[in-house]
Amino acid sequence: MTVDDKGSEDTDVLRAENEELKRQLEGVTAEAREQRSHRWRRFFAVVLAVLAVVATVAAVDALWLKTTLQDEDTFVSTFQPLPQEDAVATAIAVRVVNGVAEAVGIEAFVAETLPEELQFAVAPISESIQDVIATNAGIVVSSDAFVAIWTRSLRSAHKASSAVLSGNDELLIAEEGQVAIDLDEMAATVLEGVEAAGVPLPDVDVSIEPIVVYESDQLAAAQGVAQLVNTIGWFFPFIALLLMAGALWASPDRRWMTMFLGYCTAIGMLIALAVLRATRNAVVSGIEDPISADAAAAVWDTTFAWLVAASWGLIILAFIIGFVAWAFGPSLRAQQFSAWTSSTINRWRRPAEDEPSGFSQFLADSKRTIQVVVIVLGLVFVIFGPPLSGMLVILTTVVVLVIVALVEVFAGPARQLQASAADTPKLVDS
């Protein structure tokens, strides 16, 4: 070998080593770029997921505003049963009794009616008359006549509040800046009942302090929010869905992002419920009169009943989605859970050597399609079916899981498992 040949060989070796180093460097660089891309994609996906959670909370609130408060029929049907609540009925009756007693001036009326030698009976007779008024007030509150009075007052209150929220506050100005439920008609009915019971009272005009639903400044402060909800309220759910879809698309690990979205949505709704509960406690504790405080608590619970029920339904649904995404994950506990589920289902399956029926064969061929359709139908029922609640989600989930499990059981062992079992002796013999 000449010197030139050896030099040429060394050059080839160096060139090959350089090429190898170049390929390794390019591989490291490409891997680093891919890692940076994954980090940025995950960061962007997490941002979209957080925005989706905020949009979901806003969507639930917006739907509550539009359905419970802004729709007149729903507003009336929501608050119509309130007088059946003991705390509310007691508060209304007490207000009417106090208003009638003050307008009539019971003690002064009895004192003027009784002769001087019977003045000692003024106090007990006044108490008896007030008891008669209270009894009749209780009867009126629980009567069908009061339901009609209450319903008319609710419709008037809703029209007044809607007028202000929409920017037309002439009606509210005519009512001295308040949206209130008038009790004067109820007081007149109570007086008629007292007189029918044989207790004559002086002919007076009774004006009861109304039940104030909203003050004008409160409605003015909510005007912008109400108009915003009217404009884009129905778009909040679609915005939330778009953000969730964007987070799943951007994420390099869609299973992890599904789990993240499920758990974060549940946590976000729990925080919203905690804030709502804290606000309720602060409002009720700020009312000194215990009767009024109990009534305010009942009114608050009725007002936000749909919001609380829908929030709990969404929380449970989100936790279920997060759990299912976790169960398909690579962690040891997830794999143990999947193995336990598979072994439990396998114990109920028919033996592999049994000849499958036509129905079992159909289930085996269409198993995944049937299960996906059942899950999708369950989600559609929860979202678009009856009013969302935690119990609805739990019952729907149980039904869906039972159907999915039954499909797994009656589908029997998959055909490829049977084939491999049949082929096993041949492999051993060979």
Image (tube, rainbow, N blue to C red):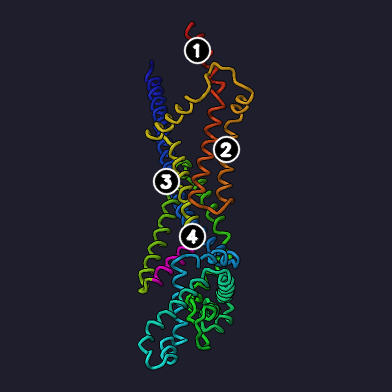
> Can residue 179 be seen here?
no
Q: Are marks 4 and 3 in contact (CB under 8 Å)?
A: no
Q: Compared with residue 407, is residue 103 higher up or lower down, i.e. above or below? A: below
Q: Which mark is residue 424?
A: 1
Q: Is residue 71 above or below residue 169?
A: above
Depth check, mark 3 against mark 2: the one in front is 2
Out of 130 and 261, give the one closest to the viewer.
Answer: 130
Q: Earlier in the sequence, mark 4 or mark 3?
A: 3
Q: Amino acid at mark 1?
A: Thr
Of callouts 2 and 4, the N-terminal one? 4
Task: Tell me the amino acid under the disc marked 2.
Answer: Val
Judged by its main secondary structure, the magenta piece is helix
Q: In this figure, which residue is indicated by the disc labeled 2?
A: 372
In terms of sequence position, does the residue under pointer 4 or pointer 1 come before the other? 4
**Which residue is identified by label 4?**
305
The answer to which of 169 and 156 lies nearer the viewer is: 156
In the rendered image, the vertical position of residue 14 relative to residue 255, given as above or below:
above
Element marked by disc 1: helix
| 262 magenta-colored | no
User: CA–CA distance between discs 4 and 3?
Assistant: 42 Å
Of callouts 3 and 2, the N-terminal one: 3
User: Tag 1 or tag 2, which sits nearer the N-term?
Assistant: 2
Q: Are marks 3 and 1 in contact (CB under 8 Å)?
A: no
